[in-house]
Amino acid sequence: DFPVVLSGRFDESGVLAGLRIVRDPRDPSRDRDEAYLLRNFLTARYGRDGWDCADLPPAEGETPVGRTFIKQRCHKTVEGNAVADIETHFFRKKGQSQYDPQSGRTTEGQFESLVRFELMRAR
């Protein structure tokens, strides 16, 4: 039950050529920290096998949330006539922290938990 932003991608003749699903990063709910789990649903839907995935290194200042750091891009040809791409993020960006350095209190929402999925008709 994740809030998502769904959009259509159209070719130059106005025909639907693909879909994009992005887990809404503005979601204020407590479930936002689990947004990256949408990836599991999508890979199950399009088959767990055959994904070509690359784990990307942290950029300067990016750190794990707890012990988890995910910055991954995956690509797959689906049923021979479509291409699926999934980008998944779960980490703290530079300057984000679990604890407020001034008060020592736990912060809320200082992390990126994102899934961007695109399914495009093969050309």
Image (cartoon, grey):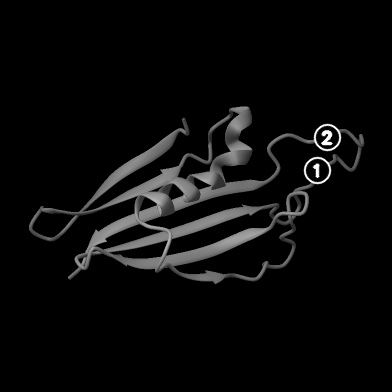
The quadrant where residue 67 appears? bottom right
Q: Quadrant of the C terminus?
A: bottom left
Determine whether label 2 and label 1 are within 8 Å by CB: yes
Disc with the residue nearer the chain's start (2 vs 1):
1
Looking at the image, is 60 positioned above or below residue 70?
A: below
Looking at the image, is 89 positioned above or below residue 82?
A: above
Residue 30 coordinates in the image, percent (x, y): 63, 29
Density class for disc 1 (Cα within 10 Å; few <14, some 14-19, many ≥20) is: some
- The residue sitting at the top extreme is 29
Question: Hey, what amino acid is under mark 2?
Answer: Thr
- Label 1, secondary structure: give it: loop
Q: Which mark is residue 63?
A: none
Q: Which residue is painted at 68% across and 67% down in the image?
A: 58
Looking at the image, is 121 positioned above or below residue 22?
A: below
The quadrant where residue 78 appears? bottom left
**What residue sits right under mark 1 in the picture?**
98
Question: Hey, what amino acid is under mark 1?
Answer: Gln
Q: Which residue is painted at 53% across and 48% down in the image?
A: 114
Looking at the image, is 54 positioned above or below residue 34?
A: below
Residue 116 coordinates in the image, percent (x, y): 44, 52
Density class for disc 2 (Cα within 10 Å; few <14, some 14-19, many ≥20) is: few
- Label 2, secondary structure: give it: loop
Comparing 89 with 95, the one in front is: 89
Distance between mark 2 and mark 1 Cα atoms: 6 Å
Comparing 110 with 23, the one in front is: 23
Q: Is residue 9 left or right of residue 96?
A: left
Residue 90 coordinates in the image, percent (x, y): 63, 52
Q: Is residue 65 left or right of residue 32?
A: right
**What residue sits right under mark 2 in the picture?**
106
